[in-house]
Image (cartoon, coloured by chain):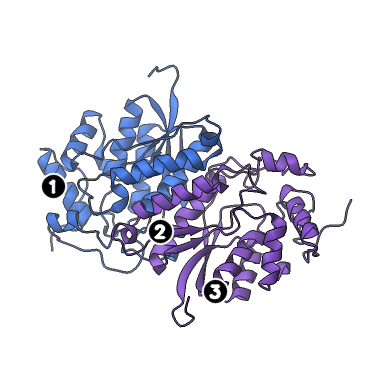
Chain colours: A purple, B blue
Amino acid sequence: MSNTQTKPAVVLLSGGLDSTTVAAIAREQGYEVCALTVDYGQRHRFELEAARRVAEWLGVRRHVVLHVDLSQLGGSALTDATPVPKDRSLDTMTHEIPVTYVPARNTVLLSLALAYAETVVAADIFLGVNAIDYSGYPDCRPEYIAAFGRLAALATKAGAEGRLDFRIHTPLIEMTKAQIIRRGLQLGVDYALTHTCYDPDAAGRSCGRCDACLLRLRGFAEAGATDPVQYQAAE
Amino acid sequence: MSNTQTKPAVVLLSGGLDSTTVAAIAREQGYEVCALTVDYGQRHRFELEAARRVAEWLGVRRHVVLHVDLSQLGGSALTDATPVPKDRSLDTMTHEIPVTYVPARNTVLLSLALAYAETVVAADIFLGVNAIDYSGYPDCRPEYIAAFGRLAALATKAGAEGRLDFRIHTPLIEMTKAQIIRRGLQLGVDYALTHTCYDPDAAGRSCGRCDACLLRLRGFAEAGATDPVQYQAAE
């Protein structure tokens, strides 16, 4: 990859730990990052602020924040009033499809990324899905990602005309959370900029007890590193 | 299909002639219509009003209007300042990908429909694509629709768990515009409720000269029927 001929890539950037690491990986691979953040009505709006901080830190070419109010469709604890589960065992959370599942979330995210990619003439789309820590989500599996890649070739003018050969990159898909964090730290990612918690307090501090916090904390512990984000004091 | 056990179906309803006919077909097949209108920042906002009128006329179970501002991504004459082409030959418009192409439009629409379908527990999604009059659009081809169907099975909790076997219905895909209109008239569709024009005037009257108007007018002529919508007076 030449530095004088930087290729654009669309990176789905939620502002969480995984997507921030993916963006750093894309940049390290020589891509010019076109970040896309989709605000789908999730409760954890601190993620959007985190996405803006991360995009600035990365020095992206462009950062688009799209609002798609999936809460109008209902169906997820992240977008409706269902309580976020707390203090679940890691075994339970990684082997069941959780209530925090958002219907067809990655399909919505990837379809918007595909539209963006065609517009900025990018063949490469990066998504921070993970099939190990989130094995309960159907749209984090490699066979799903492969099916979306086949669809992308048929779905677009650029694909149909052979001008863009879309590739969906999921560099984290087989990594543990600890491996992701180690990779990010190697690349100089400042994880203090990121936000992960499904249920932060009014000041944006993480709860430390939802599935996302528990996986993150375990990841930092296993990576032998300290999580720089602020957590709420135990009750 | 029993009338006592009505099954829900998600119908993508733009408010245009095709999607209105599709909704009438879904209803006639015994489905309870859950309409989804996506406002993707298109210029022809009269379509949205048409979608509301049609949904009311159909007596749908629920009508969700989702706003997704694809104009933030750029790339189409329908969402940016590029002029809508006028007075093109039917041969040109049906054998080239037009500038009114919206990047990955049907993928965005179908992904949102899939999220909605999973939420309302509907296995059936209806989309008014047409491979004859819109052969220039890559995401109107049967092979594209088949690829989305395969994706849907992998993309969702309901699909992964085998509770929903998603089917993408495209009853118009091999029909001419005249055949579509004849079918709709048989079903009692009031086409005065619909809106088709890419470039209406401030009163919502159709231009009669954009690709969409020309195809619609030719369709009514070939069907031996009169288009009940209002057209602007010729200059």
B105 with respect to B141 (left or right):
right
* Alpha carbon distance from label 1 to label 3: 48 Å
In which chain is the residue bearing label 1? Answer: B
Which residue is at a point 80% across and 58% down the rendered structure image?
A: A221
Mark 2 or mark 1: which comes first in sequence?
Answer: 2
- Please state which of residues B184 and B128 is positioned toward the viewer in this rendering: B128
**In this figure, which residue is indicated by the disc labeled 1?**
B218
Task: State whether discs 1 and 3 lie on one chain.
Answer: no
Determine crowd level at label 3: few under 14, some 14-19, many 20+ residues with C-alpha closer than 10 A: some
Determine crowd level at label 1: few under 14, some 14-19, many 20+ residues with C-alpha closer than 10 A: some
Q: Residue B164: where, in percent of width, then height?
A: 49, 31
B235 with respect to B212 (left or right):
left
Identify whether A64 is placed above or below A108.
below
Identify whether B10 is placed above or below A225.
above
Question: Could one spot residue B15 in this view of the protein?
Answer: no
Amino acid type, label 3: Val
* Alpha carbon distance from label 2 to label 1: 27 Å
Which residue is at a point 34% across and 39% down the rendered structure image?
A: B54
Q: Quadrant of residue A176?
A: bottom right
Q: Residue A207: where, in percent of width, then height?
A: 79, 53
- Please state which of residues A228 and B101 is positioned toward the viewer in this rendering: A228
In which chain is the residue bearing label 3? Answer: A
* Alpha carbon distance from label 3 to label 2: 25 Å
Which of the numbered marks, if any, corresponds to residue B41?
2
Which residue is at a point 36% across and 54% down the rendered structure image?
A: A153
**In this figure, which residue is indicated by the disc labeled 3?**
A60
Q: Nearer the viewer, mark 1 or mark 3?
A: 3
Does the residue at mark 2 contact the one at mark 1 (Cβ under 8 Å)?
no
Amino acid type, label 1: Arg
Regarding mark 1 in the picture, which secondary structure is present there? helix
In which chain is the residue bearing label 2? Answer: B
